[in-house]
Amino acid sequence: MNAEQKTYVDPANLRFAKTMEVLTLIGLAIFVLIGILYFSGIHDLDSLKTVTQNWNKPSAEFWSVTTGANIGGVGWFMSHWSFSDALCMLCVGFLALVPFFSIALTLPKALRRYKVVFAILTIEFAIIVIWSLMVGAGGVG
């Protein structure tokens, strides 16, 4: 390959990659900030000692032992969003949605034949999120 030849990259691929990169970096930066708050003991729900003594337990048992809460989904975290512990869980949710946002933002730039694939992926992702919230993952607990 000649040094002057350039590789063509579809603008939709560039947008997808850039969106994934930017949103992931934002999510990780938020995680670092929340981690600093947590390890500083600023408005945490669980003490670090209690957490380390119980982090080998399944999540439902962990939250029951450390906070006394019966966690049935995201509802509990949403009602405790001011605590650094719960903010970490919301940040995990944000990072899980990064591919969805990336696909949705890539849709307008995609070629017509790829728009169908991106649209199907976006719809599937939305259905999975909505379905999981409806069948118990999003219970108030």
Image: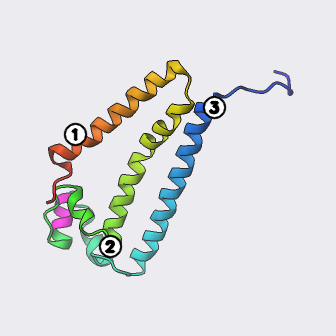
The answer to whether residue 135 is left or right of residue 41 is: left
What is the x, y in percent for residue 39? 41, 76
Mark pair 2, 3: CA separation:
39 Å
Mark pair 3, 1: CA separation:
32 Å
Disc 3 designates what residue? 11
What is the x, y in percent for residue 135? 15, 43
Taking the spot 16% from the left edge, 54% from the top edge, the residue there is: 139
Q: Does label 3 or label 1 sit earlier along the sequence?
A: 3
Taking the spot 24% from the left edge, 56% from the top edge, the residue there is: 74
Disc 2 designates what residue? 82
**SS at circle 3:** helix
Mark pair 1, 2: CA separation:
27 Å
Disc 1 designates what residue? 131
Amino acid type, mark 1: Trp
**SS at circle 1:** helix
Q: Does label 2 or label 3 sit earlier along the sequence?
A: 3
What is the x, y in percent for residue 97? 40, 46
For this rendering, which residue is in front, 6 or 130? 130
Labelled pair 2, 3 in contact (Cβ < 8 Å): no
Q: Find residue 83 and report its image quarter.
A: bottom left
Q: Quadrant of the C terminus?
A: bottom left
